[in-house]
Amino acid sequence: MRRYDVPGPRYTSYPTAPEWRYDLDAQDFAERLEAAGTAGEQAPLSLYVHLPFCRSLCWYCGCNVVISKDQSAADRYIDHLCCELDLVAERIGSRRTLTQVHWGGGTPTFLSEAQIVRLWSEITRRFKPLPDAEVAIEVHPAVTTPEQLTLLRQLGFNRVSMGLQDFNRRVQEVTNRLQTPEQTRALLEHARELGFTGVNFDLIYGLPFQEPEGWAKTLEQVLEMRPDRLAVYSFAFMPEVLKQQRRMPAEAIPTGRAKLELFRAAYSAFVRAGYRPIGMDHFAVPEDELARAQEQRKLGRNFQGYTVNWDTDVVALGSTGISDVAGGYFQNVRALPRYAANVKHGRFATERGIRLSTDDTLRRSVITQLMCNFWVELGETGARYFEPELERLRAFEDDGLLVRTGTQLELTPLGRLFVRNVAMVFDAYLARAQRPRFSRTI
């Protein structure tokens, strides 16, 4: 653990965000959209909409959020999203079908019912979700009303992800994230009555004052509700970057073995209850499509999480939205005034990004397979290309974390806890990094 507990990427992308450049601009993104449009109208897209508004700030949060109680701010933001929708539609041509739609935040249910209807209408006026499209939204049970959930289901939303993090009151108070198990259960039961599938709970381990006994109680309460999916994220404590994290007592944050034991407790509890471990930190009931995809080694990942639609171009709208289009990543600006100024004047709000080289594409494929399926087939050509990396992996083999069979690599059950470390071996950029810019791997 001492050897492997180092700063490292989570690999939601490769190359990782610190390597993205600020000399890529709106014109670069427009060209990539046009290239994506040549795939034709039958090639579906994934659409992500970032809605940054929250009514209060959770002190652990690392997302792009805007704290506001002004409902009209959302109306102005939707105006700007419509401008961006027009820009995307113009550049991507006839490619307008959607296989995946995801509203994230922030707290998307900050929007009123009228605002939800308006935004959905503006999207579907320009794009057409397929009948079997995955249409998902992130919600906070303490602020989402049953009426909002009913409306979302009527519009076509079929998946919902509920943030809860921890039910322990002391942990909630020290992180400024308050909600009760009763609120969560009521919203879950309403979602099931409405016909939502793939209901997900988000938990976080490594928060201040999380201790085995209280954490075990949270896990017990979660299992009593039995959502379809569970995500158990490692808390990234980076107070030098995220100022709000300085409000939490650093001395109360579990690290090293104490933190790992929290994850192991969750892993054991969920697997014993019949959930299948998915990727690095997710779990799903056996009949879930993610579980089936991982069994077939076809699970993928994008910025919205694990998915079976991993090979689909992703177009992201809103401040800090990250598009993954035609071999490139492109991220919008963070500040709302700058975002608005760009899209209102007919320009994409692209701030930075990267076009993947052939080497980047090869490495991304290997890292994605390891992170999602704990396995990769390099092939003879790949094994020769990655010969230096395979030599460095011998230490992982000696530690019982990895098994190499011919040109295949497979992580052992123990090795899955250190999958980020294994993936780092294939990262060509890490050796050039001047200083740690990532959370710790444990």
Image: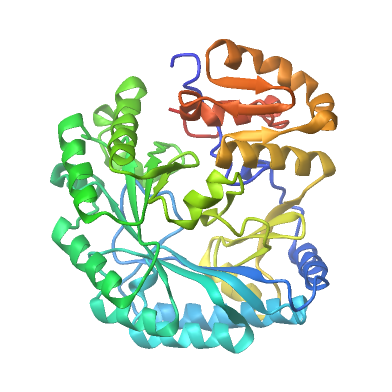
Question: From where the camera sits, is residue 346 visible?
Answer: no
In this view, 299 is above or below 185:
above
Asked which quadrant contains residue 190, the reply is: bottom left
Q: 268 or 111: nearer the eye?
A: 268
Question: From where the camera sits, is residue 145 visible?
Answer: yes
Q: Residue, x 65% and y 37% (percent of image)?
A: 367
Asked which quadrant contains residue 384, the reply is: top right
Q: Residue, x 65% and y 27% (percent of image)?
A: 409
What is the x, y in percent for residue 140?
30, 63
Residue 46 relative to residue 292: left or right:
right
In this view, 200 is above or below 165:
below
Q: Total number of numbered labels?
A: 0
Q: Residue, x 57% and y 62% (percent of image)?
A: 321
Residue 375 relative to residue 181: left or right:
right
Residue 229 relative to residue 328: left or right:
left
Asked which quadrant contains residue 204, the reply is: top left
What is the x, y in percent for residue 240?
44, 37
Q: 24 or 309: nearer the eye?
A: 309
Q: Residue, x 71% and y 32% (percent of image)?
A: 429
